[in-house]
Image (cartoon, grey):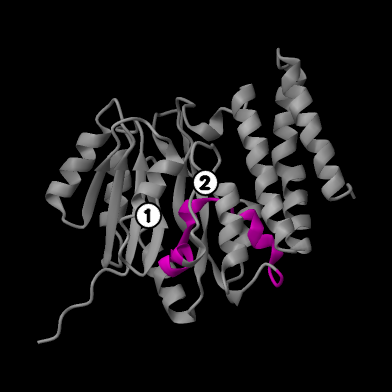
Amino acid sequence: MTTPPGPAVTVIVPGYDVAPYVPEALASLRAQTRTDWRAILVDDASTDGTGALFDAAAAEDDRFQVIHHDRRRGLSAARNSGLELVETPFVGFLDADDRMRPTALARLVGTIERTGSDAVAGAYVRLRPTASGEYSSGEVQPWVAAATAPERTATSLAEHPDASGNIVAWSKVSRMDLWHRTGLRFPDGRLYEDQIVAQQLYTHASAFDVIPDVVVEWRERADGSSITQGKDTLPVLREYLAALRAGIEVLQHAGMADAVASRVRLIRAMDLPPLAAIAETHPDPAYAAELRGFTEWLSRVLPAD
């Protein structure tokens, strides 16, 4: 009698006070067409029902494992806690307020198994609130498409510099061997931690793949409580700009000049205009000063066209 193979991929699902969205996130995992997965659910000391929902899922399905933090430690620490327990060849991420498309793991894991690359990145779309109180899935945005379409296998930033525009953790599956041999972890205590880790994955990978398939639907919460919706506050702006800068510096250190140029152009086109609009009416002059300093730094990295 042969022993059936174990799970191929672990999905790390961090959550803090996201009980209204947890059922959808976990249902999206159960609905995967590829079933050889396990999930580590990390409750970051939630004050609502998030932890209880995680526990109930684990009681019903032994593919789920739960970690409870005794105090809130942040998204990076939650993901790192999950990474310490991964025993599968591959790892992916899903935030507990988002949802995964049914074929996501089949396409991501299937691709990386076939190519032998260290990482694979897919496309993603936003889930935006509607007037009826539901959420509607949007279209793939141009910068996401530029990073992931057409499908490329065993590529690099030298060959495909626009991949640097896909900076989210949850659109990717990677080999745990890459995390082990590089010691890579999410920067503890920082916001927008995906920025630097994504560029480190790309630059450390012997090769990576990109696929145009939408793998995750990323929720823009109706109450505006997600981190990405708080850029009008000075502390969040500082974290955001620091993360953008750190990601570019990873690319600079790796000598990826074309990827640096691609990333800077995308930041100028997509990130700076809405921040500049906020700065125009922001009551604290430090907001505009922080943004101006970052813009000047970008100009030194890559002069404006």
The x and y percentages for residue 103 are 37, 64
> Does the segment drawn in magenta span residue 18?
no
The stretch in magenta equals 158-180
Query: Which residue is rendered at x = 58% and y = 74% of the image?
Result: 207
Say whether residue 146 is visible. Answer: no
Query: Which residue is rendered at x = 63% and y = 42% of the image?
Result: 243
Q: Earlier in the sequence, mark 1 or mark 2?
A: 1
State left or right for residue 283 relative to residue 79: right
Mark 1 or 2, which is nearer the eye? 1
From the viewer's side, name the closer residue of 109 and 21: 109
Answer whether labels 1 and 2 touch (C-beta < 8 Å). no
Q: As shown in the figure, which amino acid type bears the numbered disc 2?
A: Gly
Quadrant for the N terminus in the image = bottom left
From the viewer's side, name the closer residue of 39 and 189: 189
Query: Which residue is rendered at x = 70% and y = 72% of the image?
Result: 159
Q: Few, some or many C-alpha atoms within 10 Å of disc 2 (few <14, some 14-19, many ≥20)?
A: few
State left or right for residue 275 relative to residue 73: right
Q: Few, some or many C-alpha atoms within 10 Å of disc 1 (few <14, some 14-19, many ≥20)?
A: many
State left or right for residue 24 relative to residue 262: left
Q: Which residue is mark 2?
A: 138
Q: As shown in the figure, which amino acid type bears the numbered disc 1?
A: Leu
The number of numbered discs placed on residues in the rendered structure image is: 2
Q: Which residue is mark 1?
A: 83
The alpha-carbon separation of the residues under discs 1 and 2 comes to 31 Å
The x and y percentages for residue 67 are 26, 44
